[in-house]
Image (cartoon, grey):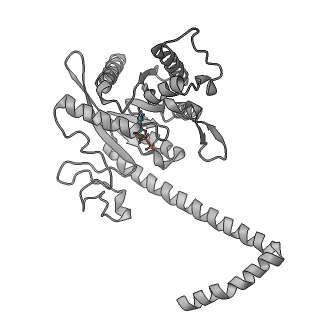
């Protein structure tokens, strides 16, 4: 059987190359057929992935029912994982317990033999068990979560859970999680400030677009989704260190992305120039948030950070805790 196939392969070669040299029509037809087959195969793969996500969604829905969570979204490589890692470390310091993130699911990190382990079969990989005798929760491989705790000024501790949908699922697929997390207490959207002079492919099209404008469009689309009922939106303007370097060292003006931006006149200090530019970007993102009729007024906050700079982050995470706490109180009072 195999030999017959190899023989056919070698027999065909001279004919194929002859056809290529003398006549272009069969080559064009072959190319079309090949393109069609590739297209069909990629459609089938996309459909299989979509079905797998739908299946995982059904299971995750039970785990997140009635829980207070903050959904973390953002453009590719904006720093979501870094932010979650730092939030986990901060929470461990705050509570003094080094167990935050025990539910952070990764099929590669969970114990061998457990429902989500790398050793499990691929069909099992996306499954979770709500309890495996250790109290651990194994989410589908599309979602990661960490408990977040912040010590507030008044001495109390604010607890919530940060949940992240893995970005590699693609923009269109990510929207599916709005069914699940659209009622989260807040959406935290991470923006890479330093991408204002970069270009990226627009998902599912042949276009390219400025990365910061693309992030703004994505944020706006998420906010406008009828499934997104978040009462609170928090924009994390990340990578301020790279942003500062681009503005001041590389001298790339913010106007390459926002031509209408005018920096303050005069000989500016680093702080004034960077703060002015960050505020401008923050205002633009905040202006994407609307409160559709019939919905309670949405509140939007912005935080600016360098998620790699551990020394500075305590104050930022405490501020995040304060914001979430105030918003919770506001909602309780409004009920
Ligand atoms: N200089 C600098 N680098 C950062 C900062 N935050 C994250 N990074 C780096 O940016 C890169 C991407 O960060 P990730 O946390 O993996 O980004 P992500 O949003 O989780 O990426 P995806 O999973 O691909 O969507 C990593 O190399 C980080 O070390 C920051 O504030 N400053």
Which picture quadrant has residue 28? bottom right
Residue 9 seen in the current view: yes
- Would residue 201 appear left or right of 14 to someone viewing this image? left
Which residue is most to the top? 266
Which picture quadrant has residue 220? top right
Q: Quadrant of the C terminus?
A: top left
Residue 125 vertical placement versus 151 (above, below): below
- Would residue 173 appear left or right of 120 to someone viewing this image? right
Residue 319 vertical placement versus 43 (above, below): above
Q: Residue at x 82, y 72 (%)?
A: 24
Q: Position of residue 14 (x, y in %)?
A: 72, 84
- Would residue 99 appear left or right of 72 to someone viewing this image? left
Q: Quadrant of the N terminus?
A: bottom right
Q: Residue at x 53, y 19 (%)?
A: 277
Q: How many marks?
A: 0
Q: Position of residue 282 (x, y in %)?
A: 50, 21
Q: Position of residue 306 (x, y in %)?
A: 39, 29
Q: Quadrant of ligand 1?
A: top left
Q: Residue at x 65, y 22 (%)?
A: 259
Residue 238 seen in the current view: no
Q: Position of residue 296 (x, y in %)?
A: 45, 21
């Amino acid at each position: 059987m195999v030999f017959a196939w190899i023989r056919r392969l070698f027999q065909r070669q001279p004919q194929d190359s002859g056809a290529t040299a003398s006549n272009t029509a069969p080559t064009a037809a072959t190319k079309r057929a090949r393109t069609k087959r590739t297209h069909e195969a990629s459609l089938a793969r996309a459909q299989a992935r979509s079905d797998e996500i739908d299946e995982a969604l059904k299971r995750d829905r039970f785990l997140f029912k009635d829980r207070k969570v903050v959904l973390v979204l953002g453009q590719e490589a904006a720093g979501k994982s870094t932010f979650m890692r730092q939030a986990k470390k901060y929470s461990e310091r705050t509570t003094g317990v080094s167990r935050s993130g025990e539910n952070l699911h990764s099929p590669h990190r969970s114990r061998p033999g457990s429902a989500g382990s790398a050793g499990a079969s691929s069909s099992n990989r996306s499954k979770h068990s709500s309890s495996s005798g250790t109290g651990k929760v194994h989410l589908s491989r599309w979602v990661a979560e960490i408990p977040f705790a912040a010590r507030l000024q008044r001495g109390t501790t604010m607890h919530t859970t940060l949940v992240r949908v893995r970005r590699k699922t693609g923009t269109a697929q990510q929207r599916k999680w709005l069914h699940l997390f659209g009622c989260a207490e807040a959406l935290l959207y991470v923006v890479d400030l330093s991408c204002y002079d970069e270009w990226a492919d627009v998902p599912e099209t042949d276009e390219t677009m400025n990365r910061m404008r693309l992030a703004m469009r994505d944020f706006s689309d998420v906010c406008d989704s009828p499934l997104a009922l978040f009462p609170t939106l928090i924009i994390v303007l990340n990578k301020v260190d790279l942003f500062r370097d681009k503005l001041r060292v590389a001298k790339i003006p913010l106007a390459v992305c926002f031509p209408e931006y005018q920096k303050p006149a005069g000989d500016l200090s680093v702080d004034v120039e960077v703060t002015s530019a960050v505020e401008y970007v923050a205002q633009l993102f905040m202006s994407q948030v609307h409160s559709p009729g019939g919905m309670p007024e949405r509140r939007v906050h912005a935080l600016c950070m360098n998620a790699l700079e551990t020394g500075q982050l305590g104050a930022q995470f405490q501020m995040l805790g304060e914001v979430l706490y105030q918003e919770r109180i506001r909602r309780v009072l409004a009920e």
